[in-house]
Amino acid sequence: MGRVQDKVAIVTGASLGLGESMARMLAREGAKVVLTDIKDEEGERVAKAIADAGGTAIYLHHDVTVERDWEQVMQATLDRFGRLDVLANNAGVGWGGPPEEETLERWRQLMSVNLDGVFLGTKHAILAMKRNDPPGGSIINLSSIEGLVGDPNLGAYNASKGGVRLYTKSTALYCAKAGLNIRVNSVHPGYIWTPMVENHLAQQGDVEEGRQALNALHPIGHVGEPDDIAYGVLYLASDESKFVTGTELVIDGGYTAQ
């Protein structure tokens, strides 16, 4: 317990799935957590559950594609807690299909959440973390195994998550060379059993058959659970990772080792 005691963390996309698990775990380990999302009812529920369990959490409505929303979230965080130590850029969307059937509108919609959201979050987190005394913090960008390897039917998603990976490295180098004491790293999950994955499988047919197919993709023999990713985020948020920046934390059950 207490691995991130009294640190102030923002987790985007925190109403469900990976973001919810990250928020709950950071709070259990002592962080004051700001949960953000566009799913307000679910986000309020998670923040209340954290508070009921003895943690500190607030929920804010937040569209990560809108810079004004980022400005308001950062200001609300600083007004409430006085600083920002951790940002988990988790909010994301995903879909696929043949590239010749993809539309520019859908491409831009995916990029606005997955890539623009990370850019805006990183920008405003750096501005906030520079105000700390002394300056410093940890920015954790959620990429994917799809940011490391290609998939024939996930071109837009591959491009967005690959962009997150290299943008992370660029900003990590900038922060290090500028002496800001801000670390920036990316996390690359394999398939994780979340409501988004389950709903996708339900649209394709039998959920259990779909899960068995996903299990078979991972040498370890099964898909991951949200806490598998949350533990990685916790490590990067904590001072245990003080020598880690500009790197990729791959949590994929062996998927990319094949």
Image (tube, rainbow, N blue to C red):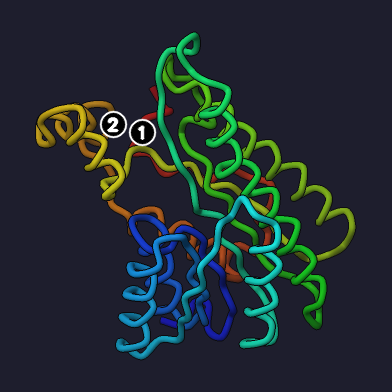
Q: Does 155 sit left or right of 231 as displayed?
A: right
Residue 178 on image: x %, y %: 89, 58
Could you give the CA–CA distance between mark 2 and mark 1, rounded to whole angstroms? 6 Å
**Which corner quadrant holds the N terminus?**
bottom left
Q: Residues within 10 Å of mark 2 (few under 14, many from 20)?
A: many
Image vertical order of residue 196 relative to residue 35, above or below? above
Q: Residue at x 53, y 83 (%)?
A: 5
Instruction: Pick the residue in front: 130 or 120.
Output: 120
Residue 205: image quadrant is top left
According to the image, label 2 marks what residue? 218
Label 1: state its secondary structure. loop
Could you tell me which residue is drawn at 48 percent across and 18 percent down?
102
Marks 2 and 1: CB-CB under 8 Å? Answer: yes
Q: Amino acid at mark 1?
A: Gly
Q: Residues within 10 Å of mark 1 (few under 14, many from 20)?
A: some
Residue drawn at x 32%, y 75% is 45
Side of 203 where 51 appears, left or right: right
Residue located beneath label 1 in the image: 254
